[in-house]
Amino acid sequence: MARKTLAAIMLSAAFVCASAQQEAMRIVVFDLTAKSAQVEADSAMLSEMLRNEFIKTGRFEVVSREQTARIMAEAEFQSIGLTSETEAIKIGQLLNVRRAIVGSVGVLGDAVFVTVQLFDLETGRFITAESIEAPGIKDVVSRMRGTVSVLTDAVYGTKAAAAVPATEPASSAPAEAEPLRKKPAARSYPRLINYIGYATAAAGLGAAAVGYFVFDAAALEAYESAVAAKAAYDGATEGFTELWDAYQGFLADIDANSGYRMYSYVAGGVLAAGGLVMALLPPPRAGRASLGRGPRLAVLPSGVLVTLSY
């Protein structure tokens, strides 16, 4: 086992050294040609961003724009000069590069089109090309990294695969399943939500009791007073205005207390039902075993069984 581990370490070290010694390919990225007047001001910035994306891959040595312009001027090239194989090969020799990136940017309708081509300066032929179609310049920038990734794979032939040192051959036989072990029950206690349920149910029952014993009694008392006031009003010969006002006031008390009673019933019913649900939530299994008392919920084929043990 120690020999295999040592061999794996040595193989990994050799791979790292080989990768470090591998020189990055030298390329040149020419400025994108503006095909539309709307993008003349943006073509230079897009070209610089394209160079930066190739630099950030870490797999290329990109010739700077200033060095390219100086060498082209010294060679008396008036343009990029990729119009013929002979001129392309000469540019590659002057810049000491094997690959070149050329392209253009233009507007067609409401969309911006960018074409990026990979050119072989040794043979004077195009290798591959990628196009970007976007509604605006910002969208072109966001998609430029994917285009550079595709062109990088084309330059190196295939995508670089991560080297994984071989240690021991993987066995095709399935691993034996470890037998299940029954875990011992751990002690636990009712959860906080159970206690909240107890308190909420008690509050609901209290609210219902207030509605029944307080507001219901007040409404009944107001009703009886209203009946008496109406009878007095009907048989009165003087002072009936005060009696009518008293009658109207008792009617208002009846309506108010009836409303309070209804609110109490509704609130009490909702709180009691919610509290009962939370109170009956079963604690963890071990909690039931340790407590031995309290509410229990069992699901049977014919329904749900709720039991209370005290």
Image (cartoon, rainbow, N blue to C red):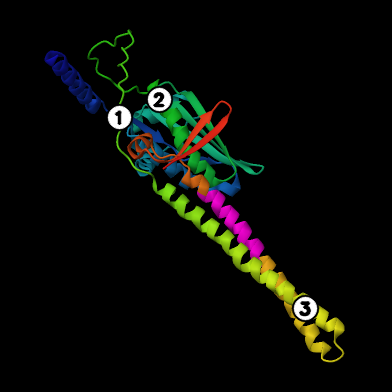
Q: Is residue 12 left or right of residue 28?
A: left
Question: For this rendering, which residue is in front, 220 or 17?
Answer: 220
Q: Name the residue type under label 2.
A: Val
State the residue at coordinates (73%, 77%). Answer: 225
Q: Name the residue under label 1.
A: 24
State the residue at coordinates (43%, 43%). Answer: 49
Image disc number at residue 228: 3
Compute the Cα span from label 1 to label 3.
107 Å
Which mark is first along the chain, 2 or 1?
1
Residue 260, x across and y down, in percent: 64, 66
In the rendered image, the residue lying farthest to the bottom is 238
Residue 257, x across and y down, in percent: 67, 69
Q: In this view, does 228 lie above or below 283?
A: below
Q: Quadrant of residue 3?
A: top left
Q: Name the residue type under label 3.
A: Ala
Q: Name the residue type under label 1.
A: Ala
Q: Is residue 156 above or below residue 75?
A: above
Q: What element carries label 3?
A: helix
Magenta span: chief secondary structure:
helix
